[in-house]
Amino acid sequence: MGSSLLTNSSAMTALQTLRNVSTQLATTQNRISTGQRVSTASDNAAYWSIATSMRSDNAALSAVSDSLGLSAATVDTEYTALTSVIGDKNSGLTKLQALLVEAKTAGIDRSKIQADVTQIQNQLKSTADSATINGINWLSIDTTPSSSTATPTSFNLVSSYSRVGNTPTIGSITVTTATYALYTTGGSSTTGILDAVVGGSTGASVSSINIGALTDSATDQTKLDGYINQVTAAINSVASAAANLGAVKNRIATNTEFVKNLMDSVDRGVGQLVDADMNAESTRLQALQTQQQLGVQALSIANQNSQSILSLFR
């Protein structure tokens, strides 16, 4: 084949090959630097769209995980307060019950026992009032009608997130405050477990029991029996509320673990769609670099042909 000064076919072929190699090399270098084989929609529109939606879902799941953490802290605070209210032989309602039983003893100084009763009553109120986290308290609630400061009748604790098609669904755990309320304010009457009055206008609540003036008379002994029954019922009610919160705690813990595992699964799914195989890409990079060097040499040789033709005219 003859040589032409106007068209250097060998150089053009070498240059085209070099351009293709340079383009592939740039793509491979980008994959290695980003760690992704699909980093933009132009790389693979379908995979990029799916990965973007999955990342959005994972962001929502992350928010659910944060919400579950706050819910767990709230429930744990209220649960701890309830168990403290129940107490043991040295504190709480359990101790109060024991003191009332002791007050049944004939000839005992009930005014001194009342001093201990009053201290326990104050401690119970303090415990309930202190069970506040992030401005939320389920044990001491405000039931003022149509008030901006009133405690909501229920709370929805975000527990899950899912999306089918374009329709997202947010799951929640509903907690009814009346179930756990020990003290209430603002309503026409007190309805909490410890401040609800039993026995009409002459009755008392657990928080207002006073045995200081009671005697050994049959009437006063009957009243003491009523107080003991009242405190026993309160213990059962608080224990039931604590058990209910315990179940909520377990559900939150289960959902928290599930959401974490789900987020990991989504991350793995996104990775399978868009992540680059670094072993393959590094091998490809070395091969392309070799091809590039060979292309440069081929182009240099092709250009030397033109220089050889010019030497004939010297």
Image: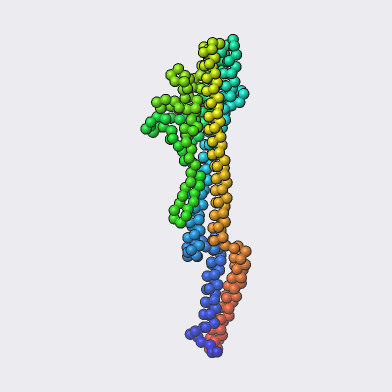
Residue lying furthest left: 146
Taking the spot 55% from the left edge, 78% from the top edge, the residue there is: 14
The image quarter containing residue 288 is bottom right
Residue 123 makes an appearance in the image = no
Residue 247's x, y, as percent? 55, 38
Taking the spot 49% from the left edge, 33% from the top edge, the residue there is: 179
In the image, is residue 311 above or below residue 141? below
In the image, is residue 41 above or below residue 203? below
Residue 299 makes an appearance in the image = yes
Taking the spot 47% from the left edge, 36% from the top edge, the residue there is: 176
Q: How is the image coloured?
A: rainbow
Residue 64's x, y, as percent? 50, 46
In the image, is residue 142 above or below residue 102? below
From the viewer's side, name the closer residue of 230 and 49.
Answer: 230
Taking the spot 54% from the left edge, 70% from the top edge, the residue there is: 24
* Quadrant where the N terminus is found in the figure: bottom right
Left or right? Give the position of 246 relative to 192: right
Residue 155's x, y, as percent? 46, 38
* Quadrant where the C terminus is found in the figure: bottom right
From the viewer's side, name the closer residue of 92 and 62.
Answer: 92
Residue 180's x, y, as percent? 50, 32
Total tally of numbered discs in the picture? 0
Left or right? Give the position of 197 relative to 80: left
In the image, is residue 67 above or below residue 91? below
